[in-house]
């Protein structure tokens, strides 16, 4: 089994302001989807990313926000276990971000230690 | 009460106290001497009480005999006492005359420290459970063998090896430091959890023994709750889980020890007191930020212990299973999660997810598929239940599956 990272991106929406119920429903959709992967024993790790963040650029230039000058922002990532990229892509199906105008980028993880 | 009934009862309650105090005093290296002295104490009780009658205060009698036997041992084995005297002087710097301290405080402290000594990851979990049953619960070797469905010889060997390991690793009998305690507690809780499950799911037909195992796990867990150093939210979470589960003890088997499935249980037999205790410990467990697998399992057990049907029940259970799987995968959690999914999103959605699970060596997997296909494709349901029956290991499981198959076949023909 190899590891694959799924990176969740969506467009920055300045007027984004869901109700608590929508938030709750959204969390449940994510949990149901991730629970489905975990039920197959294929979840390795994962994290959500907060809206708070900064970007460090050359010459010690610090930009506010993690998303300066890009249209899309990364909302989180998970690492899954699969035999190949095709299987990992299958696992990505049904990801809630797809129905909210976002996308899932699936990348093979290469261990630094070789 | 005559001595024939009193001694086993005292053995259950006092054996662990005396042996814990003696182990603490001698060090784990001399655990066998501690065992011998404790056993001799009870042997003498059996001999004298039968002929001379039961003393006024049997417990105090046992303590005095244990103290004297220890002193005798020291006198008779000079080399031993010289070797150990160094350590004891370190522990009891005040007194020249060495004394076995059987005060309430020392008993409690020693027992708590023994829990950490025995539940040590350097010995395998099964051996930890065995030793805990022997030393901390005063179980006989034959009872432990029955609980593990094996023979006395195997258990004796297992315990011997475990004690050898503790001795050669010169484990100190002490409470872990503040920094270590959370990590060490995890091992202790795992052992208690396994001990409880051994009782709850054991295949032995002896219901009283199964109940005893569960009660001992709860008693040891309560011990951790009573002590400030170990009364952590996660400990309360495990306690809540055990209370909820054991509340159904009377309802889950019939007179001859056959299991009664959750749906068919008489809810009047559920123990309200234990459910209330479960609720209490669940609230205690909610302090702090930690969300352990015990919290999630207790949460699921809470919903299953509610006698009133709540429309949010399965939503909550599904979410708890999702979280549980993200913390730790296990086939049985995956199957339970898929069942919960069928309750929330319907059987058709659950079938798609179930077919991805690939747990083909597990008979519960085929039972689940059989359930999911019932009333959707009964021919398929029958073939899945038949596969489950081929793989089922216990007679109880086979009988239950047989009932389901007969019901389905009757339905098909009608």
Image: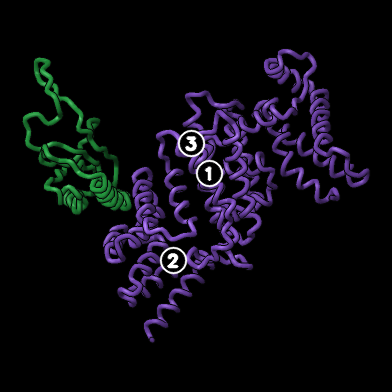
Do the dots labelled 1 and 2 sit on one chain? yes
Q: Is residue A88 left or right of residue B183?
A: left
Q: Is mark 2 on a helix, strand or loop?
A: helix
Residue tagged 1:
B280
Q: Earlier in the sequence, mark 1 or mark 3?
A: 3
Residue tagged 2:
B391
Q: Is mark 1 on a helix, strand or loop?
A: helix
Q: Is residue B353 above or below residue B85?
A: below
Residue that lies at the very extreme toward the front in this rendered image: A19
**Would you call the spot at circle 3 few (<14 residues within 10 Å), some (14-19), or many (20 or more)?**
many
Q: Earlier in the sequence, mark 1 or mark 2?
A: 1
Q: Where is residue A80 in the image (x, y as percent from the top left)?
A: 25, 44
Q: State yes or no: discs 1 and 3 in contact (Cβ < 8 Å).
A: no
**Would you call the spot at circle 2 few (<14 residues within 10 Å), some (14-19), or many (20 or more)?**
some
Q: State yes or no: discs 1 and 2 in contact (Cβ < 8 Å).
A: no
Residue at image position (55%, 28%) is B229
Residue tagged 3:
B233
Look at the image and tell me whether residue A1 can be seen.
Answer: no
| B250 and B369: which is toward the camera | B250
| B355 and B219: which is toward the camera | B219
Quarter of the image with the C terminus of chain A in it:
top left
Q: Earlier in the sequence, mark 2 or mark 3?
A: 3
Q: Where is residue A20 in the image (x, y as percent from the top left)?
A: 26, 44
Q: Where is residue B380 in the image (x, y as percent from the top left)?
A: 32, 74
Q: In this view, does B214 lie to the left or right of B318?
A: right
| Mark-to-mark CA distance, 2 and 3 | 39 Å
Answer with the quarter of the image where residue B57 lies.
Answer: top right
Disc 1 versus disc 3: nearer the observer = 1
Chain letter of the residue carrying label 2: B
């Amino acid at each position: 089994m190899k590891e694959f990272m799924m990176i969740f991106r969506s467009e920055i929406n300045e007027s984004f302001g869901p109700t608590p119920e929508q938030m709750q429903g959204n969390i449940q959709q994510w949990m149901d989807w991730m629970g489905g992967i975990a039920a197959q024993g294929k979840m390795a790790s994962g994290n959500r990313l907060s809206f708070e963040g900064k970007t460090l650029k050359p010459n010690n230039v610090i930009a506010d926000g993690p998303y300066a000058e890009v249209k899309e922002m990364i909302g989180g990532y998970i690492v899954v276990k699969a035999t190949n990229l095709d299987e990992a892509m299958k696992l990505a199906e049904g990801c809630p971000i797809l129905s909210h105008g976002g996308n899932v980028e699936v990348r093979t993880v290469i261990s630094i230690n070789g | 009460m005559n001595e024939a009934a009193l001694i086993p009862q005292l053995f259950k309650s006092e054996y662990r106290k005396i042996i814990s105090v003696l182990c603490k005093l001698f060090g784990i290296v001399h655990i066998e001497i501690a065992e011998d002295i404790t056993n001799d104490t009870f042997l003498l009780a059996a001999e004298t009480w039968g002929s001379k009658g039961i003393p006024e205060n049997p417990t105090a009698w046992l303590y005095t005999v244990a103290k004297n036997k220890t002193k005798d041992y020291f006198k008779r084995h000079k080399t031993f006492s010289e070797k150990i005297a160094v350590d004891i002087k370190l522990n009891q710097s005040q007194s020249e005359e060495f004394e076995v301290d059987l005060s309430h405080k020392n008993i409690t402290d020693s027992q708590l420290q023994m829990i950490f000594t025995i539940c040590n990851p350097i010995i395998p979990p099964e051996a930890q459970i065995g030793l805990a049953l022997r030393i901390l619960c005063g179980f006989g070797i034959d009872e432990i063998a029955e609980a593990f469905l094996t023979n006395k010889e195997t258990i004796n060997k297992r315990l011997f090896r475990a004690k050898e390991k503790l001795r050669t690793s010169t484990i100190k009998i002490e409470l872990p430091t503040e920094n270590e305690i959370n990590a060490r507690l995890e091992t202790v809780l795992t052992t208690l959890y396994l001990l409880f499950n051994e009782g709850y799911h054991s295949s032995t037909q002896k219901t009283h023994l199964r109940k005893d195992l569960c009660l001992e796990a709860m008693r040891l867990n309560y011990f951790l709750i009573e002590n400030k150093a170990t009364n952590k939210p996660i400990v309360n979470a495990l306690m809540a889980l055990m209370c909820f589960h054991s509340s159904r003890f009377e309802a889950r088997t019939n007179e001859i020890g056959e299991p009664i499935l959750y749906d068919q249980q008489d809810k009047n037999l559920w123990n309200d007191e234990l459910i209330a205790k479960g609720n209490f410990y669940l609230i205690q467990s909610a302090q702090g930020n930690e969300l352990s697998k015990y919290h999630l399992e207790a949460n699921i057990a809470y919903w299953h212990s509610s006698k009133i049907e709540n429309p949010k029940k399965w939503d909550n259970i599904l979410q708890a299973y999702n979280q549980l799987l993200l913390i730790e995968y296990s086939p049985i959690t995956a199957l339970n999660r898929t069942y919960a999914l069928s309750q929330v999103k319907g059987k058709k959605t659950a079938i798609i997810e179930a077919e991805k699970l690939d747990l083909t060596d597990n008979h519960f997997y085929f039972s689940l598929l059989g359930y999911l296909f019932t009333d959707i494709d009964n021919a398929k349901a029958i073939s899945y239940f038949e596969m489950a029956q081929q793989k089922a290991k216990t007679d109880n499981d086979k009988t239950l599956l047989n009932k389901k198959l007969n019901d389905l076949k009757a339905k098909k023909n009608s």
